[in-house]
Image (spheres, coloured by chain):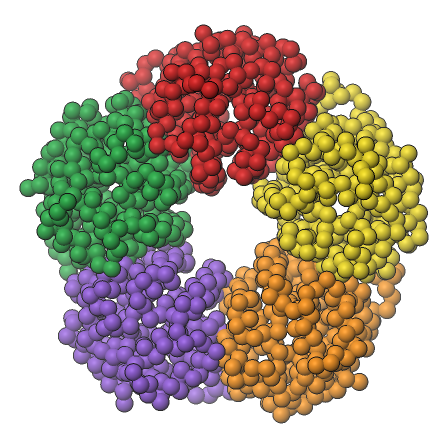
Chain colours: A orange, B purple, C green, D red, E yellow
Amino acid sequence: MIYSDKVKFILNQYENTNAGIKANLGRILMSGKLSGTGKLVILPVDQGHEHGPDKSFMVNPEAYDPTYHYELAIEAGLSAYAAPLGFLEAGAETYAGQIPTILKINSSNSLSSIKNQSKNGTVKEALRLGCAAVGFTIYPGSDYQYDMIEEFKEISFEASEAGLPSVLWSYPRGPNIDKESETSIDTIAYATHIAALLGAHIIKVKPPSSSVTNNDLKKQYSKFLSNIESLSDRIKHIKKSAFNSKKLVVFSGGNAKGTQEMLEEIEQIKDGGGNGSIIGRNTFQRPRAEALQLLQSVINIYKK
Amino acid sequence: MIYSDKVKFILNQYENTNAGIKANLGRILMSGKLSGTGKLVILPVDQGHEHGPDKSFMVNPEAYDPTYHYELAIEAGLSAYAAPLGFLEAGAETYAGQIPTILKINSSNSLSSIKNQSKNGTVKEALRLGCAAVGFTIYPGSDYQYDMIEEFKEISFEASEAGLPSVLWSYPRGPNIDKESETSIDTIAYATHIAALLGAHIIKVKPPSSSVTNNDLKKQYSKFLSNIESLSDRIKHIKKSAFNSKKLVVFSGGNAKGTQEMLEEIEQIKDGGGNGSIIGRNTFQRPRAEALQLLQSVINIYKK
Amino acid sequence: MIYSDKVKFILNQYENTNAGIKANLGRILMSGKLSGTGKLVILPVDQGHEHGPDKSFMVNPEAYDPTYHYELAIEAGLSAYAAPLGFLEAGAETYAGQIPTILKINSSNSLSSIKNQSKNGTVKEALRLGCAAVGFTIYPGSDYQYDMIEEFKEISFEASEAGLPSVLWSYPRGPNIDKESETSIDTIAYATHIAALLGAHIIKVKPPSSSVTNNDLKKQYSKFLSNIESLSDRIKHIKKSAFNSKKLVVFSGGNAKGTQEMLEEIEQIKDGGGNGSIIGRNTFQRPRAEALQLLQSVINIYKK
Amino acid sequence: MIYSDKVKFILNQYENTNAGIKANLGRILMSGKLSGTGKLVILPVDQGHEHGPDKSFMVNPEAYDPTYHYELAIEAGLSAYAAPLGFLEAGAETYAGQIPTILKINSSNSLSSIKNQSKNGTVKEALRLGCAAVGFTIYPGSDYQYDMIEEFKEISFEASEAGLPSVLWSYPRGPNIDKESETSIDTIAYATHIAALLGAHIIKVKPPSSSVTNNDLKKQYSKFLSNIESLSDRIKHIKKSAFNSKKLVVFSGGNAKGTQEMLEEIEQIKDGGGNGSIIGRNTFQRPRAEALQLLQSVINIYKK
Amino acid sequence: MIYSDKVKFILNQYENTNAGIKANLGRILMSGKLSGTGKLVILPVDQGHEHGPDKSFMVNPEAYDPTYHYELAIEAGLSAYAAPLGFLEAGAETYAGQIPTILKINSSNSLSSIKNQSKNGTVKEALRLGCAAVGFTIYPGSDYQYDMIEEFKEISFEASEAGLPSVLWSYPRGPNIDKESETSIDTIAYATHIAALLGAHIIKVKPPSSSVTNNDLKKQYSKFLSNIESLSDRIKHIKKSAFNSKKLVVFSGGNAKGTQEMLEEIEQIKDGGGNGSIIGRNTFQRPRAEALQLLQSVINIYKK
């Protein structure tokens, strides 16, 4: 596998990172149809744990089967497939080596109102399953955030020693963060920066809105960052918060409703320098053929 | 021991599972009168811990004696016998090798109103007692759920390394889950799916009612899953939630009152593709002869 | 030391129990004046920790001295002496080998209103002191019960591996358990059964009253267990809850006021099949000669 | 070093205690001007942590310097010097071997109202600093008491294995203990007895007042212990609570205001059989010469 | 590297400290333009974690890039550069050996109102990054203080064993400490003394105001310490609280607004015997050239 210049450049920015981690980051960056572009499209399927199987899969019942997602991700030529232990385990032999996998270590569920997560997997299991990375979620601002952060640090430290990079879902929420703030540009910038400081290798955040919700920052933004009306400008700012673009940042599907709107959003993520998309619901909740077509469109955008 | 095709098929679905776990799952699937059918009838006796000895055994006082349950399960030709440490220990030598046993690791008791459980046994003790699996209970939705899940993961990880499969009792309860929701089809599907994602090898849930209690799902169900009026259709849906039937799911006795009603329920569990029944109270609270006759009827249904 | 048939019979019921534990149970059962009878009289002196030295010893000031209790227990020919670390340590050399000792691992104190205990000793210290068993208290029903139970399990697991049996004080208390319930026959049966399920080798409970305090059980008791008016019948029921008498159960002094009343109670414990008495306050709060005479009377009853 | 008969007698009472602990207790008992008398005068300087440097040292500013206290204790010929990590470390080389030191492991601070302490040192650090013992504080009756006791037990267990004795500050406080109760004779007796049961080798309590604050004990005291009006009689009772005088008990300065009053109090501690004094504020808050003179007077009393 | 007499004198005061710690303290004291003077100017950049990237870097957007801070600190000739894991990692290879680095282990974030911090790094990572020290923050007086102190002790113990000194940010806050008290001279003296007792090698506090907020101390101060009107006298007192100047104490930028005011403050810190400044916001929030000029002025003051 010969790295493209883009991939070399990206990996060089992860300095003081061990060879195992670089090899696994390289594995993800060189997989699928976006191989070598420095862009990523990842399929995450933790929806069944977070919201239940019926809310996730009823509209497209083939998706109850864990092999469906492996095959969808492989056929679509994605960069990686991320899921909790059970889902990965159910295809880890059959699909071994066909797509890099990411073990999503912790998960919440919507049966309870406590905004916390439990660790449902271990680094040892990620290694046994041949994963290329571990995934973890933190809620900056939550009452449980300090524990969640320390749990992430333990997992990512152990993963690092085993040569596994960590992908961090950084989702602000908590008593001081209202609905609007959860996706305001200043909050998303903060969540991104914390993830980078914690040593995450790939950062996942939601696409930022044009709101600035921290009162002290409203003046600052209007003075120093006049261009945040377009999503691409906001993505650029988020990348800036990720160590001046030194870290890979990928974005979830956001609030986009129709396919067209979603693809336009992805155009802007691309224009702003975002490293790609993590798209779950928007793929496995469509019929397979439609999902494959959508993913091809997404890939086409990132390939441009 | 030559595996039947049914058992081979089931075990093949547990891919990326080590040989020890497969051997013990095979041991359970090849034991008793249902040997080789892919169906299971398990006797669980943690009732004494959960509700006290008098509520459990007074109507049939022979059942105060732990050897009673070993003998009942063996004579009835069941697939396995599950109980807490003390009960298993009291017959582990006498009945060694006569029936697979499952150490029920955690238990609650009804003296307190806190909806939690304590770990009353260890994987090392399960090994010492020659068990074929460990059993654990989680309460998805409870305020203690995240701790319970992490405790299960620690136990099941250690058990897996020792080649012991895990049986997970997944019983939704908690502040957001009213009585009706505890057995509504959408909640049971959720509880089943979580258990599967956590890597449990055998999942125990209650038979689902025809209620759909999550408001967002009411429309979904009426649109996509019109046939949930019969229990067999509901069981089919629960199995679908268990990785499209890839995981073994067994059902507790449910609310059935009379013997006839209970057997009819089991007919439907069978028809829906359920892998069997865990029947406690309904057996050891009857006179021995009557219990044996009932269990034979249950086995006959699953054998059909 | 040649075991009597009684002792052999009792030890045989502890099946799947390692040789070290059996040897230490045998040591206790073959010590003192009740050697070989299968009956036990144990002196417990944790009263100083639980209620303070003055409430415990002021009426009989010799008892402030830890050597007093060793000598009382030895001279009375008791089966064992149980106390916290400091008290045992103060005579462990002088009286080595003269009476089996039980290290009481956890204790409460009455200065605080929190119904919990702290672990004040370890299995390693029990071994260093040459003890024949470890003792522990749980409060089934308390808000701390799940932690206490898990602590007991850790201690008893470690003790078992070192060949030390565990003696479990099982004292129901907590928000759902009023004063009457603490000693009602159904609650004591429950506390006994939990202790047995947890794997305790000797169970200590209070003598049960004739109250039935769980509403669901009132009908059950009047239907199935008409004879609970005499203490001996109640003791029989408690022994039944201890795995149909397979586990040793000893009883504390209870509410008995006068000596005569106490001895009558012990007659009934004996008649009901109880394995003996743990008598603290009723001995060390009398002048030494009087205490020795009382203990002789107790022993005489159990010897009959 | 040849032990005096007094010291031999004291050490013999610590039976079942390992040679390292005895050697270190001997080291303290044979140091300074009270060498061999079985009496101890110890300088404790944790005041800076507990109340801040200004409240502690401003009246005598030389005392801000940690070397001041080493020199004071050495020149005064005291038995030992006790302080937190930083203070000991600052002179551990310069004054090595000139006086036994006690590492005070835990400390509170008065900036917060939570009645807890943090562990600020370890047994390993005590060993590295060449200490002769470790010191610890518990608050019997506090909401944190069970944790504090378990922390003490962990520290003292580890210290014991390394041959280090433990000195336990046993200070009753908490929601059920009002100001008067903190030093009432019955509470101090209880605190002393708990410390002894926990296995502490040297017990530090406050001098008891003549109040009896536990209602049940008021009658008891007037019946059995008529002589508690003089401090020396009360000290005798406290020593009785320490295993009938088998454990070393030292007393803090108490409420004494003037020098004369303080010396009279110490006379009574001595007459009652107390093993000595721990005097902090009353020494380092005076000019050095005055402090040395006072300590000489104290030593003279204990030498008589 | 030949130590200056100043540095030798300082290191000699850290007695009973291992060679590795002394070597690393020496490394910091001999680095940059203040090499050998016994004075330190340190650049700390944990602002991005504590207050977010936008509040920290928007006014000077080059500062979003972690290499900016390395280069600023190196070019300015500072003594050390302190930052969280991600920031250090991003330049640890490129700038290896060019400036001593301090891994800031724990951090808070302003998204939540809970006054706690999470550990975001480990001693092992500090070693991997080639750091010269670890940094930690405690909040004396906070409800979390006892946990924070114990966490610091664990980190600093492990760091010490690896030869890494610890830098302790000691920032009083909590329910009993109002805004004025957070920087009052008596509170700062207390915070400094606690840090010293905990064994920190370099102590960071805020410059003290002339308020005395503890009521008991108001009289004391007016009696014993009449000269606290000038900052240099207050700094002298803080140094006195640091074991009579035996420990290195550095000060943050304080409330100074303009450059002139800030430099005057630093003059007084120097005059009072303070060991230097930790200046973050006041440098990286200015244009680079201006920041370099300011730092040169600060260094000039300390060099005088």
Residue positioned 42% across, 28% down in the render: D22
At horizontal 34% and vertical 79% (from top left) the residue drawn is B26
The answer to whether residue A252 of the structure is visible from this angle is no
Instruction: Specify the quadrant of the image occupied by residue D220.
Output: top left
Q: Which quarter of the image is occupied by the N terminus of chain B?
A: bottom left
Which residue is outermost to the left?
C304
Instruction: Locate residue B205, reporting x and y percent.
Output: 39, 73
A201 or C234: nearer the viewer: A201
Residue B62: x and y in percent read 16, 64
Residue found at x 30% / y 33%: C92
Which residue ends up furthest to the bottom in the rendered image?
A289
Give the total number of marks visible in the rendering.
0
Where is B204 relative to E152, above or below? below
Image quadrant where residue A203 sits: bottom right
Q: Is residue B88 left or right of residue E175?
A: left
Between B252 and B275, the residue placed more toward the observer is: B275
Query: In x, y percent, where is residue E126?
Result: 68, 52
Where residue A251 appears, x then y in whole percent?
70, 73
Measured along the vertical axis of the image, is residue A231 above or below residue C76? below
Residue sitting at 77 percent across and 44 percent down?
E27
Looking at the rendering, in which quadrant would you find the C terminus of chain B? bottom left
Q: Nearer the viewer, residue B239 or A4?
A: A4
Q: Is residue C62 above or below residue B229?
A: above
Residue C70 can be seen in this image? yes
Residue E37 vertical position relative to residue A214 in the rendered view, above or below: above
